[in-house]
Amino acid sequence: MGRILAIDYGHKRVGLAVTDPLQLIATPLETIHSQDLLAYLKAYHQRDPLDALVIGMPKNLQNEATDSTSAVVGVVRRLRKEFPGVPVHEIDERFTSRMAHAAMLAGGLGKKDRRDKATVDKVAATIILQSYLESR
């Protein structure tokens, strides 16, 4: 079995999370610059084949598109083109950043660490991935 990788896409940063080989546990991977996403995923997929990609789809409280939605739709299109054999799943990402802050607070992270947006993005990607795993 390959791993499943989750993406919390932002215009500047991308949070990434990955499962274990048995696809049971979601773990934060890292935060990268959004321009480096495809190159990073290609290199990762060569090292450790991916069974699926999961990306958070931004929506507002009325379940409508946000300012970021069109950028994510473009990324999804590129992912499907670059990784034709890897399914790309879209997951509603509403409240993931807020949930990430709450999880970091509950985990005992200090105020300085909770303000680190790169850490928030990794944790948000982990929440997106865990949500996907639970929905299967």
Image (tube, rainbow, N blue to C red):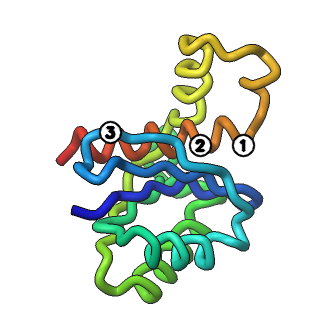
Considering the numbered disc 3 on the image, is that residue within a helix, a strand or a loop? loop
Instruction: State the CA–CA distance, disc 1 to disc 2.
Output: 6 Å
**What label does residue 25 carry, if any?**
3
- Residue 67 in which image quadrant: bottom right
**Residue 49, percent from left and from top:** 36, 71
Instruction: State the CA–CA distance, disc 1 to disc 3.
Output: 21 Å
54 relative to 95 in the view: left or right: left
For the residues bearing labels 1 and 3, Cβ distance under 8 angstroms: no
In this orientation, which residue lies closer to the viewer: 68 or 116?
116
Instruction: State the CA–CA distance, disc 3 to disc 2.
Output: 15 Å
Give the mark nearest the N terminus, 1 or 3: 3
Residue kind at label 2, given as amino acid type: Lys
Give the mark nearest the N terminus, 3 or 2: 3
**What label does residue 118 carry, if any?**
1
Residue kind at label 1, given as amino acid type: Ala
**Residue 106, percent from left and from top:** 54, 11
Considering the numbered disc 2 on the image, is that residue within a helix, a strand or a loop? helix
Total labels drawn: 3
In this orientation, which residue lies closer to the viewer: 125 or 21?
21
- Residue 35 in which image quadrant: bottom right
Q: Which residue is mark 2?
A: 122
79 relative to 10 in the view: left or right: left
For the residues bearing labels 1 and 2, Cβ distance under 8 angstroms: yes
The residue lying at 63 percent from left, 59 percent from top is: 68
**Residue 40, percent from left and from top:** 60, 71
Q: Quadrant of the N terminus?
A: bottom left
In this orientation, which residue lies closer to the viewer: 78 or 68?
78
The residue lying at 49 percent from left, 49 percent from top is: 17
Vertical order, 106 against 3 (above or below): above
Vertical order, 71 against 17 (above or below): below
